[in-house]
Image: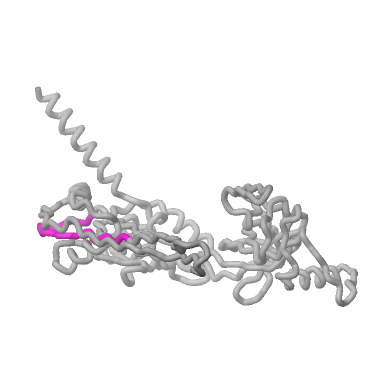
């Protein structure tokens, strides 16, 4: 009997520890290092080798201008006034992200998107395109064959298309030619930026770092934790390698309800609760029916004319509207069950949640995006 009791206590302790560990996240998943970030690159270029699906040059004169400039750089002069009908060329915008600590010769992926009215970039090749940063300096050169994830076909005036044909990707399509200057390792402090502002989380991260003795951490605000380090690259790399793998227990989140008015979607987190309230939501429907009636004269040769008239019928109905009780809910499952019991559509649910917040029945922050 005693062994069974000890076994149960051990299992309970193990389950408790496992639940605590399940609620812990690593610091690397909760924060980013200030100054260690990607940089956006952009370029303008040409895609050639298309199977008659390129830009209609009469409507996109910049495509022919770009082709003329490229040919002149290659020693080919196009006579003035030449009307080039190019069907296999398309003007494109090329975008990429320059990783932090990127070195010369490293390759990055690029995304190629049509700028004109090309029908498809499938099978095309991107010509050498300079990739510039916000300072208008060239940091990479892009070139290669485009991989388009869509497919389409047309014949006899009918067409079918799957996914997007006017955009594609080149894996490793850009080569870094200029390195971005970084001040990492030159200062005696490192700042960890939280992914979401939370005073409790900032304090817990600082306490976890100080308890390990790997550094001196101080929370500056709800978003930043500052760590004192020696100004040396190698020591800071070793310090971050140890700090980023420390587990921190995640505090309770703020109760939030996110409403997207454009798509009609409603999302809420697990901290949302409801107080007891009563809700009445009526459904107002308006139906408009139009019919075209043709009126002809009774006598064929009486001089009358055939007239088309429009007959409109409008029907307005209002159903529902009964006052329904919504019980207090302590967890997300009960909240969802209570809201589903109202039988409201997502559009109606938005109005109900706004009214609940105003009445103090909704224990959450309502955010409309």
151 w.r.t. 116: above or below: above
Q: Which residue is drawn at 42% across and 68% down?
A: 191
**Residue 24 x, y percent position in the rendering:** 31, 50
Magenta span of residues: 271-287
Tell which of 123 and 175 is nearer to you. Answer: 123
**Principal secondary structure, stretch drawn in magenta:** strand
| Residue 284 counted in the magenta span | yes
Quadrant (top left/top right/bottom left/bottom right) for the N terminus: top left
Whether the magenta-drawn stretch holds residue 268 is answered as no
Quarter where residue 19 is shown: top left
Camera sees residue 307 = yes
Residue 179, how many percent across, how many down?
Answer: 65, 67
**Quadrant location of residue 350?**
bottom left
Residue 319: % across, % down: 19, 56
Horizontal side of residue 364 vs 136, given as left or right: left
The residue shown at (53%, 67%) is 184
Give the side of residue 222 with respect to residue 228, left or right. Answer: left
């Amino acid at each position: 009997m005693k062994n069974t009791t000890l076994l149960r206590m051990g299992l309970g302790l193990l389950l408790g520890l496992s639940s605590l560990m399940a609620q812990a996240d690593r610091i690397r998943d909760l924060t980013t290092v200030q100054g260690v970030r990607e940089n956006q690159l952009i370029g303008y270029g040409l895609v050639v080798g298309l199977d008659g699906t390129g830009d209609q040059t009469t409507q996109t004169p910049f495509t022919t201008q770009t082709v003329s400039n490229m040919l002149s750089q290659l020693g080919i002069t196009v006579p003035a006034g030449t009307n080039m009908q190019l069907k296999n060329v398309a003007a494109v915008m090329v975008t990429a992200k320059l990783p932090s600590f990127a070195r010369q010769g490293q390759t990055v992926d690029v995304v190629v998107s049509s700028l004109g009215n090309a029908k498809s970039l499938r099978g095309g090749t991107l010509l050498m395109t300079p990739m510039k940063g916000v300072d208008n300096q060239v940091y990479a050169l892009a070139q290669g064959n485009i991989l388009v994830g869509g497919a389409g076909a047309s014949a006899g005036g009918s067409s079918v298309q799957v996914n997007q044909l006017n955009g594609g990707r080149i894996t490793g399509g850009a080569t870094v030619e200029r390195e971005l200057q970084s001040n990492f390792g030159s200062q005696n402090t490192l700042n960890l930026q939280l992914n979401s502002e939370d005073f409790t989380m900032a304090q817990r991260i600082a306490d976890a770092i100080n308890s390990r003795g790997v550094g001196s951490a101080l929370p500056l605000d709800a978003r930043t934790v500052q760590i004192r380090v020696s100004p040396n690259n190698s020591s800071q790399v070793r310090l971050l390698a140890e700090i980023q793998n420390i587990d921190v227990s995640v505090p309770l989140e703020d109760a939030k309800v996110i409403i997207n008015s454009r798509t009609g979607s409603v999302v809420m987190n697990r901290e949302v609760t409801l107080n007891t309230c009563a809700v009445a939501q009526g459904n107002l429907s308006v139906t408009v029916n139009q019919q075209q009636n043709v009126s002809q004269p009774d006598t064929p040769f009486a001089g009358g004319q055939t007239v088309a008239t429009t007959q409109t019928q409008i029907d307005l109905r209002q159903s529902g509207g009964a006052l329904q009780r919504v019980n207090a809910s302590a967890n997300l499952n009960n909240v969802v069950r209570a809201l589903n019991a109202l039988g409201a559509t997502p559009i109606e649910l938005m109005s109900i949640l706004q009214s609940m917040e105003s009445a103090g029945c909704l224990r959450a922050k309502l955010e409309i995006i």
